[in-house]
Amino acid sequence: MSSHAVRSAPAPLTRSRPALLRWPSATAWTTLSVAAVLIAVAFAANGGLRLGETTKVEMALLLLFGLGGAGAILATPDRGRWWGMGAVAAFAVYAGWTLFSITWSIQPSDSWVEVNRTATYLAGFAFAAALARVAPRQWEGVLGGIVLASVVVSIYALMTKVLPGHLSADELYARLRAPFGYWNATGLFAALGVPACLWLGARRHGYGPLNALAYPAVGILLVTQLLAYSRGTLLALAIGLIFWFAVVPLRLRGAAVLLTGLAGAIPLALWAFARDGLSTDRLDSALRGPAGHQLGILLAVMVVVLLAVGLAVTFRAQRAPLSRLTRRRIGTTLLVVLALVPIVFAGYLFTTDRGFGGSISHAWTTLTDPNAFTPPNDPSRLTAIGSVRSRYWNEALKTWKDHPWQGVGAEGYATARPFYRQDTLDVLHAHGFAVQTLADLGLIGLALSLLVLAAWGWATARATGLRRRDKGQPFGPERIGLLTMTATVVVFGVHSFVDWTWFIPGCTLLALLCAGWVVGRGPLETHVDAAREPLPPLRGPRAWLRAPGPLFGAVAVIALALVVTWAVWQPLRALDATNDALAKLEVGDYQGAIHDAYLAQDRNPLSLEPLSVLAVAQAGSKDDSGALATLQREVKLQPANPDPWVRLADFQFNRLNDPKAALTSLKAAVRLDPRDPQTLGAYLVVRAAAQKK
């Protein structure tokens, strides 16, 4: 745990105002810009499930990335190779396979939405790589923006507890889930900010008081994670921090930030767990208010105390740095303490009724059994092992085994799951990137995603000096910053293995910003040299005229961004037209509803909703044959989806008085969803009527 591995002399902390505070410095602009974008996406896109909000965010991001990418192509001087393009190309191939899956998808409309999401992520990844090329020295601003964004979002989430009557009057659950509407996303967004906070508090350069802010920031982020009861994010953060401490030589400084944050967060969280107003579901906001106000006071006290500790530690390190022997002793002590943790835990297992082996076996069975007991939705789940994920994973693997090579199409898991489920829950995702990808895109999709990971890993090792041949390179400030970004990606990657947070733009965009920046920065030796020399001036209009290649490239990027943005917009335009048709149905304007339904279907020919509304409008205008043909088109469009079969059967039975035809349709629906009680009930009623007729 010692920090004697640093090979270059660190820059001392300065009492003058840092670059970050010299308004309006480039670093300050970068920090505020990155934070503003991440915060806006987190609040505007929410949990990524609402088509309207998500589409608007995607369109704005695509235009931003397109203009930014074009600007990078125009402005960047000729510095040789564009690093990271291999990883970008691999990502593009994966996105292309996602797009191609529409052709066989059992839910092509949802696949289109997933393609839009993936295209936006690809654009963000490529933009981050280009930004690292055009503004390579703004890495501090990127990390600063991540710190600011994660803290702001976490403070808002905590304020929904502190001021429930104003911010979360209708909240049903005690688990912290704002602003995403999903507790694991709230915990993950906080976890993604912790490595950057460690960098801020542990770095050997910069403004001392600013660095000290990392101490209360870590406390806020850890409290947010604990109040979200998110075991997956705690596991992901632990692995990401292990990586950070293993590769970054600021171990003692980082340990001081982390341990101080833990010392403030854990007691506060335990206090909150013991308060019914903060840990009991379905309480009125008036009952949650007093405990929330107390939490706010304790949070303020924690921030003040941690800030004071941070200032003391920071300036103590500046005035009287620890000797190498003292650092080594402290590091050895911390390593011994860490090594004792698994030993003590193993000893505890030996004292239990099941013994060590029985406890391990029971834990593994509980973790992997699809029918295992699900932990309650309260703080006790933080120490529980059981989870419903094994059930979702089991169903995803069954889906994949029936469609091994290409899967059921992007986002098709939710439609395919009813055939395999043993319950009546409606679940949208398999809660794991690997199993979801297997179910949706098959072995080919998983192989392409692994190709992206391999390309990113190779480029990251090259940029951060983790290759064997880079051993001995100095740990300069930028290298430590890039390693911190890599640790952030590790946190997201580990969490993606145990949860499907890919569909939440706020979390994914933050991770892709780090991932793209690292690969776009190029080999370690290139930016080590660049740190010592002034950067060449950016290109100007005269350079574009002399060599118009970049100009053509910029125009192509903008054109591509506009085309993709238009394609992303179409499902939302179709939804708007469908809603217009529904509004006209309510007032009896059947012809107007038919017109709008056709318009919606033209905009999104893969969606069932326009056809469903069209069938209702046709039936209302006494065109039963047209309505029947429309419902049959629904079935033809998505034959593996039980919903259109149920709607067709309902029309055949209640409108056409044809129970035999309805029974045939319901048999198909029951085969696709044998556990749905409403479908089974309708099947019994229709079968009885068909037998009488």
Image (cartoon, rainbow, N blue to C red):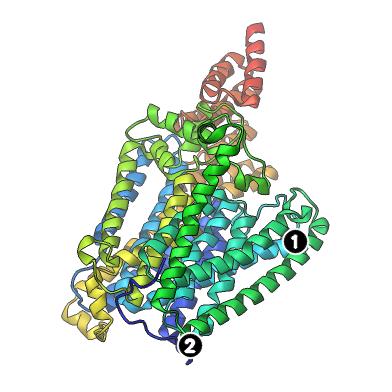
Answer with the quarter of the image where residue 362 lies.
top right
Task: Report the front residue among 241 and 686.
Answer: 241
The residue at the point 64 percent across, 73 percent down is: 303
User: How far from the left and from the top, in percent, is residue 418?
Assistant: 53, 29
| Relative to 81, residue 642 above or below | above
The quadrant of the rendering that contains the N terminus is bottom left
Answer with the quarter of the image where residue 557 lies.
bottom left
Specify the amino acid type for callout 2: Arg
Under tag 2, what secondary structure? helix
User: How far from the left and from the top, in percent, is residue 345?
Assistant: 54, 46
Task: Report the front residue among 598 and 129.
Answer: 129
Q: Residue furthest top?
A: 692
User: How far from the left and from the top, in percent, is residue 57?
Assistant: 50, 61
Visible in this render: residue 124?
A: no
Residue designated by label 2: 319
Closer to the chain start, of discs 2 and 1, is 1
The quadrant of the rendering that contains the C terminus is top right
Residue designated by label 1: 164
Visible in this render: residue 378?
A: yes
- Disc 2 residue crowd, few under 14, some 14–19, many 20+, Cα 10 Å: few
Position of residue 623 in the picture relative to residue 482 (left or right): right
Under tag 1, what secondary structure? helix
